[in-house]
Amino acid sequence: MDRLTSLIVFGRVVECGGFSAAARRLNMSTTMVSNHVQALEDRLDVRLLNRTTRKVSLTEIGQAYYQRSSQILADLDEADRIARALQATPQGKLRLHSSMSVVRFLAPVISEFVDLYPTVSVDLTVSERMVDMVEEGFDLAMRSLPLPDSSLIVRRLTSWRNIVCGSPAYFERHGTPLRPCDLVRYNCMRHASYPFGDEWRFEGPDGEPASVRISGNLITNSQETLRRLAIDGRGLFIPPPFIVADDLGSGRLIRVLENYSGVEFAINAIYPHRHHVSAKVRSFIDLLAERFADHRRWMEMKY
């Protein structure tokens, strides 16, 4: 028999003063109540209750066992209460992982979230590496490039497409490319996580695919390094538009190949499990979705 159920039944017999009263309280047959108590006694090889035709009383061992088992059941009830509370209201520590490119969007959401839910603390790790969310204990990850692990749950927040840009000084020296195939003549600096390697892929004005095998003197996993070197006139790169929005607005960088857009990617919220998502994770994802509706203008801006 189920040991936990037997403990509960035993406790009810003691509290009700008999098998019949316990059976009525538990909506169980008197025989089943007796069987549960007997199963405990057989397992322990002790007598827990003295039984007479008129009443039931605890043995000395039964008294000690009842006191301890009652505390165990009370602790289990408290554990259940705490778990339900954590599920109902955001609280505890929220462990987040983000790529650097998404932090500019993530930081204000974190600020708003901890203001809304002061019982939640946030532990944010920023890196470009692919983490094992389950093994490393992350609740949620934010990434702007596809993940290889298809077992994770992905919530799409917004789409985006790469653009090609460089500094005015670089184009003054080397001229302006008009088609993707022209890029073979330029120093094209590459992000290590770009999923197509040194083949830059585009969609043309009519949606037709185009690609070119580029070469350059830099490969890095740092968008900021690529951005800085492009501003310094060292070459071209193919960033998400939200990385360079301010630079394009100020003229530090210029977009080229405007009739050709990169293939579509998405900024995603990624988490390990679909079922029984905690309140802190569920609430943070919902807030992300709301705020990214506001941020989509970054993805759709024309320069």
Image: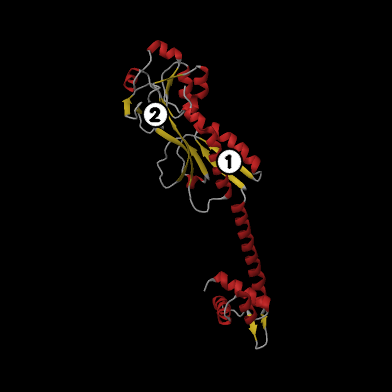
Q: Is residue 78 left or right of residue 134?
A: right
> What residue does disc 2 label?
262
Secondary structure under tag 1 reads strand
Amino acid type, residue under disc 2 in the picture: Gly
> Residue at the bottom extreme?
53
Which label is found at residue 241? none
Mark 1 or 2: in front is 2
User: How far across and down, in percent of the image, does residue 274 sit?
Assistant: 48, 50
Amino acid under disc 1: Asp
Q: Is residue 134 left or right of residue 4?
A: left
Side of 162 relative to 50 (left or right):
left
Q: Is residue 287 above or below residue 186?
A: below
Closer to us: 63 or 245: 245
- Specify how the rendered protein is coloured: secondary structure
Residue 290 relative to residue 50: left or right: left
Of residues 82 and 298, which is closer to you in this image? 298
Query: Which residue: 47% across, 23% down?
Result: 227
Name the quadrant containing residue 28: bottom right
Q: Are marks 1 and 2 in contact (CB under 8 Å)?
A: no
Give coordinates of residue 252: x percent, y percent.
Answer: 50, 17
* Residue 123: mark in rendering: 1
